[in-house]
C-alpha cells in the first residue's frame, strides 16, 4: 500500500529526522573514527588518511555539477559498488569522494573515473581551485539576476587546469550566488560571483492588492524607499505603493515579500565580482569578500566577461602572492590600491561603501601607496 | 529526439568541466519532462531572465517546511514544468551514503519527480528538483515508510543542521561533529518542520578552526572545535619536515617548486601571535599566547596536533548580507565541552536560552544576528547569562556612550530638582 488520499492522516509517519550517519560509513571510516593521525595529498584529488591502528584510507575526489540527474547518481553508485564496497560521500562543495582501504585499489578507481569522459575530473585538493559552490539560477529560482550552473561551467572550463593541479599560493574558493539573497552565502569567498539587479522594482498596481500585504512590502525596504500610494485601475481607486527610485539599492527584498514588485531585467541584471573573503581562522581572522567589479553583463551562454575577470584575478594572484597567502591576505599585504593596479581593474565609486557601517572601510590614515590612480596628483 | 531546440545550451556541452546540459539530456531520455526544463532554461538564456513565478505555498500535511513551491510562467510552452516544486530531504551527517540508500532515493525520485537533483543544497540538504503538487503526499509517504527518511527545513524554521566530516576522516576534529549534528537535529524535529521562529535558524558544526562547513560565516549557532591545553608536538616529525622528508601542508603545495621547506619562514614567522621558536633543534610553543588558528598544524600535520582537552567555541549570529549587511558569528562562549555523554546539554542550554529570547523579541524576518545588533552585545550577553570578557570584542569601544543602568549608579536616578535648585541658582 501507499499514500491513501481518502485518509491522508492515517498511518502517517513524521519527525523521523535524517538517517543515522553510522549506517552510511564505509568500514574503513567506521573502524577508525576518532583515530586518525595525519593525512597527505598524494597527487591532485587523491588523499591518504593514516590511522593509529595502521589502517589507511585512500580518497579520490572528483567534481560533479551541483545540478545532477539520478542517472548520474546511479553511475556514481556503480563506481562505488565496484571499487568502494558500496559507500561514498559528497563534500560541501559538490565534489564526490570515493574511499578505498588500500593503495592497490586506487589506480583501478582512477582509471575507471577517467574512462568516463569528462564526467568525473579528479582534483579539487590543496592549493588549487576547487569546485564552485553555487545557487539555482534560471534553472529553478524566481529571483535570480543571472544563471548559476551556466556561469559555473564556463568559469571552471577556463580554470580547469587549476582544479587538477596544486600550483596556487593557497586554496582558492570560488562561489556564485545568483542574487543578493545569497543562498550560496558567497560573502566569505576568495572570489564571489554575484548576480545583481540595477533596475528598481516595477509596481503592478493591478496585482498588488490581491497578492501582497502592502505594509509588509513597505517594511521590507531597508532604505525606506517604498511608500503607500493610490492608483486607478479600471476606473477604481486601489491601494498600492510607489518606489522612490534614487533610494533603491536593488536588494530585491521587496520582491521577496511581494510578487507584484518584479525587478529582474535583461539589461539591468548582471554579475558583480567580490574578492578576498575567507572562512577559515587560519593565520588571519575570517574576512568578508569585497566588491571590486560592480557590474558585468549577462552574456549567455558563455559569459566571457565574467570568465575573463575571474581568470585575471586568479592568475594575477598566483603570480604575486606568497606561499600560504589567501587572496584576501595578499590584497591586504600589498594594499587594495595595489590590488586594483596589479589586476588592472578600474576602481570606481561603486567600490566605496555608502551603506551601513560604511565609515569602517574609509581610509583614515596618511599611509597609502602611490599607484596610477594617484598620478593625477603627482605628475 | 529533443523536444526543444537548445542551441545556446548546446554550447555548454563542450569543454573539460562536466556538463549539466549533457547530463540533463541523458536524463530526458527516461524522464521526458526534463526536456521542458531544458526548453525553459534555453528560453531564459535567450531572454536573459528567469521564467519561474514567485513562490506558491505547497507542502505536506502537518509540516510547514521542506518543500518550496515553484511554477513556470510559460506553462503552455513547457507543460512538463508547470509545477516544479523542490523537495528538501535532510542529509545524513557529513553526507556519507550507502549506495543502497542513494539508489533508493533515485528510484523514489524517478517515480515521483523529475529525476534532477542538487547534491547538495547550500545548507546541506539533498535537493530533489521539480515535482507536481499531487505527487508531494505520495512521495512523502514513500520517503518515510519505505526509506525511513524525512524532509529538511525551509522557511522560518530550524534549517537542516550541517557538519564537517569531523572525526570520521579528519585528525583535527576536536569533538564528534557528526553525532552532535545528528542528535540535535533529531531533538529539534518540531522546530525543523513547523515554523515558529521570526526567521530561519541554522546550526553548523565544524570540528576545528579551519571551519570546513563555514559555520562562522553561515550559521546562527556555530559550534567550532578547539582545545584548551597545549598543541601536541612530535619533535622527531618536526625534524623530518625540516629535512624535507615529509611534504609541508600535507602535500597541498606540491604542484609548484616553492623551494626547500623553511620552518622559520613558513611556520614560525607566519604564526599570528609569534608564539613559536626553535631551541636546541626543537620547536617550542608558548601555548599561553596561542590563539589556535591552525596554521602550524595545517603545515605540519604529522608533527603537530591539537591538544587533548578538546571542546568547542560557540559563536552566534552569522548571516548573508540581506538586509543589514553580512555578519560573521560573534564569539559568545570561549570553550564548552561537547559530548554525547550528557546529550550535548551545554549546547542545548545555550540554544534554548537564545530561542526563548529571540522568539519573544525577534521581528518578522529578523535573524538572531540582527536582533543581537539591535539590542547590543552587552544586552545579549546578559540574556545568555554570560559574563562579559575582553574575548568578546576585537577592541573596546571608542565612544563613551555607555547605557548605564539605574541600579549600577550610586543613589539611583531619582533626584529632587527643587533641592538641587536650593544649592544651584539658574
Image (tube, coloured by chain):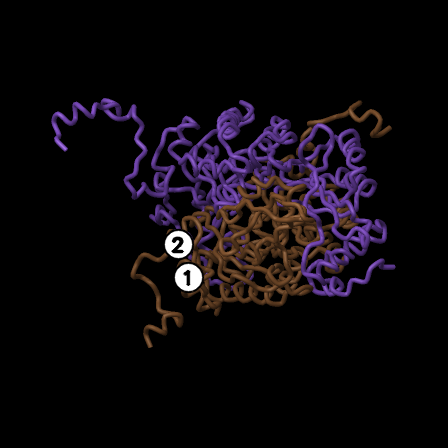
Question: Can you name the residue that lies furthest to the front here?
Answer: A235
What shade has chain A been given? Answer: brown
- Inspect this view and state whether residue A51 appears: no
| Residue for point 72% across, 52% down | A109
Secondary element at image label 1: helix
The C terminus of chain A lies in quadrant: bottom left
- Looking at the rendered image, the disc whose residue lies closer to the viewer, 2 or 1, is 2
Q: Which residue is mark 2?
A: A361
Q: Compared with residue B337, is residue A91 higher up or lower down, i.e. above or below?
A: below
Image location of residue A352, percent across then percent down: 43, 58
Subunit of label 2: A
State which chain is coloured purple: B
Image location of residue B173, percent across then percent down: 53, 38
Subunit of label 1: A
Quadrant for residue B157, please give it.
top right
- Tell me, yes or no, whether dots 2 and 1 are on the same chain: yes
In the rendered structure, the answer to whether residue B263 lies left or right of residue A97 reads: left
User: Mark on residue B408?
Assistant: none
Question: Can you name the residue that lies furthest to the bottom here?
Answer: A379
The N terminus of chain A lies in quadrant: top right
Q: Which residue is mark 1?
A: A336
- Inspect this view and state whether residue A256 appears: yes
Amino acid at each position: 500500500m501507499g499514500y491513501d488520499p481518502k485518509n491522508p492522516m492515517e498511518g502517517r509517519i513524521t519527525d523521523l529526522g535524517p538517517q543515522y550517519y553510522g549506517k552510511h560509513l564505509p568500514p574503513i571510516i567506521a573502524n577508525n573514527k576518532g583515530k586518525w593521525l595525519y593525512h597527505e595529498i598524494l597527487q591532485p584529488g587523491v588523499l591518504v588518511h593514516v590511522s593509529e591502528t595502521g589502517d589507511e584510507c585512500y580518497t579520490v575526489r572528483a567534481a560533479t555539477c551541483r545540478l545532477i540527474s539520478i542517472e548520474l547518481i546511479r553511475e556514481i553508485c556503480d563506481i562505488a559498488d565496484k571499487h568502494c564496497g558500496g559507500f561514498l560521500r559528497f563534500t560541501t562543495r559538490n565534489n564526490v569522494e570515493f574511499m578505498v582501504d588500500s593503495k592497490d585499489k586506487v589506480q583501478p578507481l582512477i582509471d575507471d573515473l577517467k574512462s568516463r569522459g569528462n564526467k568525473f575530473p579528479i582534483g579539487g585538493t590543496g592549493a588549487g581551485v576547487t569546485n564552485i559552490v553555487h545557487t539555482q539560477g534560471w534553472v529553478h529560482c524566481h529571483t535570480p539576476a543571472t544563471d548559476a550552473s551556466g556561469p559555473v561551467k564556463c568559469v571552471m572550463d577556463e580554470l580547469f587546469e587549476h582544479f587538477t593541479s596544486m600550483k596556487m599560493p593557497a586554496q582558492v574558493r570560488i562561489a556564485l550566488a545568483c542574487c543578493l539573497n545569497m543562498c550560496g552565502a558567497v560573502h566569505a569567498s576568495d572570489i564571489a560571483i554575484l548576480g545583481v539587479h540595477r533596475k528598481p522594482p516595477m509596481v503592478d498596481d493591478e496585482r498588488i492588492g490581491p497578492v501582497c500585504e502592502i505594509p509588509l512590502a513597505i517594511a521590507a525596504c531597508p532604505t525606506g524607499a517604498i511608500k503607500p500610494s493610490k492608483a486607478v485601475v479600471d476606473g477604481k481607486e486601489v491601494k498600492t505603493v510607489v518606489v522612490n527610485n534614487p533610494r533603491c539599492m536593488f536588494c530585491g527584498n521587496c520582491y521577496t515579500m511581494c510578487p507584484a514588485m518584479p525587478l529582474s531585467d535583461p539589461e539591468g541584471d548582471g554579475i558583480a565580482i567580490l574578492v578576498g573573503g575567507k572562512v577559515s581562522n587560519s593565520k588571519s581572522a575570517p574576512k568578508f569578500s569585497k566588491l571590486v567589479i560592480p557590474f558585468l553583463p549577462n552574456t549567455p551562454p558563455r559569459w566571457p566577461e565574467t570568465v575573463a575577470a575571474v581568470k585575471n584575478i586568479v592568475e594575477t594572484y598566483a603570480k604575486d602572492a606568497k606561499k600560504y597567502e589567501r587572496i584576501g591576505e595578499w590584497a591586504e599585504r600589498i594594499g587594495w590600491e595595489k590590488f586594483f593596479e596589479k589586476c588592472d581593474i578600474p576602481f570606481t565609486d561603486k567600490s566605496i561603501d555608502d551603506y551601513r557601517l560604511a565609515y569602517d572601510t574609509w581610509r583614515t590614515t596618511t599611509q597609502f601607496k602611490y599607484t596610477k590612480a594617484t598620478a593625477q596628483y603627482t605628475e | 529526439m529533443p523536444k526543444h531546440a537548445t542551441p545556446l545550451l548546446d554550447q555548454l556541452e563542450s569543454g573539460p568541466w562536466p556538463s549539466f546540459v549533457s547530463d540533463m539530456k541523458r536524463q530526458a531520455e527516461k524522464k521526458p519532462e526534463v526536456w521542458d526544463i531544458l526548453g525553459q532554461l534555453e528560453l531564459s538564456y535567450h531572454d536573459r531572465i528567469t521564467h519561474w513565478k514567485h513562490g506558491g505555498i505547497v507542502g505536506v500535511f502537518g509540516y510547514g517546511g521542506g518543500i518550496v513551491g515553484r511554477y513556470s510562467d510559460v506553462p503552455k510552452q513547457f507543460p512538463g514544468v508547470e509545477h516544479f516544486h523542490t523537495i528538501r530531504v535532510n542529509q545524513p551527517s557529513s553526507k556519507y551514503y550507502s549506495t543502497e540508500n542513494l539508489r533508493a532515493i533515485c528510484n523514489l525520485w524517478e517515480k515521483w519527480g523529475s529525476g534532477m537533483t542538487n547534491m547538495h543544497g547550500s545548507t546541506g540538504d539533498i535537493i530533489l528538483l521539480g515535482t507536481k503538487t499531487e505527487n508531494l503526499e505520495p512521495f512523502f509517504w514513500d520517503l518515510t515508510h519505505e526509506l525511513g527518511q524525512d524532509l529538511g527545513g525551509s522557511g522560518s524554521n530550524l534549517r537542516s543542521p550541517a557538519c564537517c566530516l569531523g572525526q570520521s576522516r579528519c585528525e583535527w576534529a576536536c569533538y564528534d561533529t557528526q553525532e552532535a549534528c545528528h542528535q540535535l537535529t533529531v531533538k529539534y524535529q518540531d522546530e525543523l518542520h513547523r515554523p515558529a521562529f521570526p526567521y530561519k535558524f541554522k546550526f553548523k558544526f565544524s570540528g576545528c578552526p579551519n571551519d570546513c562547513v563555514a559555520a562562522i560565516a553561515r550559521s546562527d549557532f556555530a559550534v567550532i572545535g578547539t582545545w584548551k591545553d597545549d598543541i601536541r608536538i612530535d619533535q622527531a616529525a618536526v625534524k623530518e619536515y625540516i629535512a624535507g622528508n615529509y611534504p609541508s601542508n600535507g602535500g597541498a603545495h606540491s604542484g609548484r617548486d616553492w623551494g626547500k621547506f623553511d620552518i622559520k619562514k613558513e611556520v614560525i614567522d607566519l604564526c599570528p601571535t609569534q608564539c613559536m621558536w626553535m631551541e636546541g633543534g626543537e620547536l617550542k610553543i608558548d601555548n599561553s599566547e596561542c590563539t589556535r588558528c591552525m596554521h602550524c598544524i595545517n603545515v605540519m600535520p604529522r608533527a603537530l596536533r591539537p591538544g587533548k582537552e578538546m571542546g568547542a567555541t560557540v559563536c552566534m549570529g552569522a548571516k548573508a548580507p540581506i538586509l543589514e549587511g553580512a555578519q560573521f558569528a560573534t564569539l559568545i562562549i570561549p570553550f564548552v565541552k561537547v559530548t554525547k555523554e550528557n546529550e550535548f546539554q551545554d549546547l542545548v542550554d545555550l540554544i534554548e536560552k537564545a530561542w526563548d529570547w529571540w522568539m519573544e523579541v525577534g521581528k518578522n524576518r529578523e535573524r538572531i544576528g540582527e536582533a543581537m545588533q539591535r539590542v547590543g552585545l552587552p544586552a545579549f550577553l546578559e540574556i545568555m547569562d554570560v559574563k562579559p570578557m575582553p574575548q568578546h570584542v576585537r577592541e573596546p569601544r571608542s565612544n563613551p556612550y555607555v547605557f548605564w543602568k539605574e541600579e549600577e549608579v550610586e543613589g539611583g536616578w531619582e533626584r529632587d530638582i527643587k533641592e538641587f535648585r536650593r544649592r544651584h541658582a539658574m
